[in-house]
Amino acid sequence: MGNIAWAQTGTPAVPAPSPFGMLLPFILILFVFYFLVLLPQQKKQKEHKKMLDDLKVGDDIVTVGGILGKVEKIKDNIVTVKVGEATTIDFLRNAISQVIKPKS
């Protein structure tokens, strides 16, 4: 009988945490990761694609390798860049890092 009284008057049982309460921190981390990492990266990729689509003959460019030149010809995915007096190099369109805007 003593054991039964102790079990009834002992500490109350702790309720189990809800599954939503346990998942909430992970969901918050995913949202923060999306807004701080993935969203800006997607925006940058869209801007780079737009820049490559708007590329035209005569643009001054910089390649991913750091070569400066002027676009001489564009054919499909190949861009011919003049890098010197009589020197031209063919690059893939994706190898162009940026277009240098003329100072106004």
Image (tube, rainbow, N blue to C red):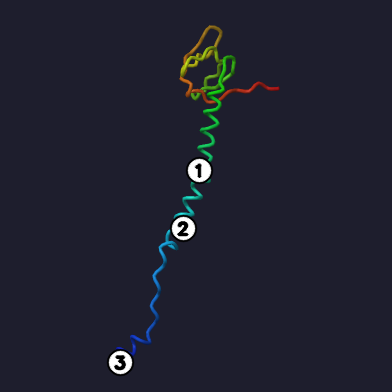
Q: Residue at x 52, y 25 (%)?
A: 97
Q: Which mark is residue 37?
A: 1
Identity of the amino acid at label 3?
Answer: Gly
> Is residue 69 positioned above or below 40 on the image?
above
Q: Which mark is residue 90?
A: none
> Is residue 17 positioned above or below 101 on the image?
below
Q: Along the polypeptide, which appears first: circle 2 or circle 3?
A: 3
The answer to whether the residue labelled 3 contacts the one labelled 1, judged by CB atoms less than 8 Å apart, is no
Q: In which image quadrant can residue 47 be found?
A: top right
For this rendering, which residue is in front, 60 or 7?
Answer: 7
Q: Residue at x 65, y 21 (%)?
A: 102
Q: Which residue is mark 2?
A: 25
Task: Please state the horizontal and vertical placement of residue 61, each as a whole percent of the image.
Answer: 56, 20
For this rendering, which residue is in front, 51 or 66?
Answer: 51
Q: Which residue is mark 3?
A: 2
Mark 2: few/some/many CA within 10 Å (<14, 14-19, 20+) = few
Mark 3: few/some/many CA within 10 Å (<14, 14-19, 20+) = few
For this rendering, which residue is in front, 41 or 85?
Answer: 41
Task: Please state the horizontal and vertical placement of residue 30, each as a whole percent of the image.
Answer: 46, 50
**Under tag 3, what secondary structure?**
helix
Identity of the amino acid at label 2?
Answer: Pro
Identity of the amino acid at label 1?
Answer: Val
Mark 1: few/some/many CA within 10 Å (<14, 14-19, 20+) = few
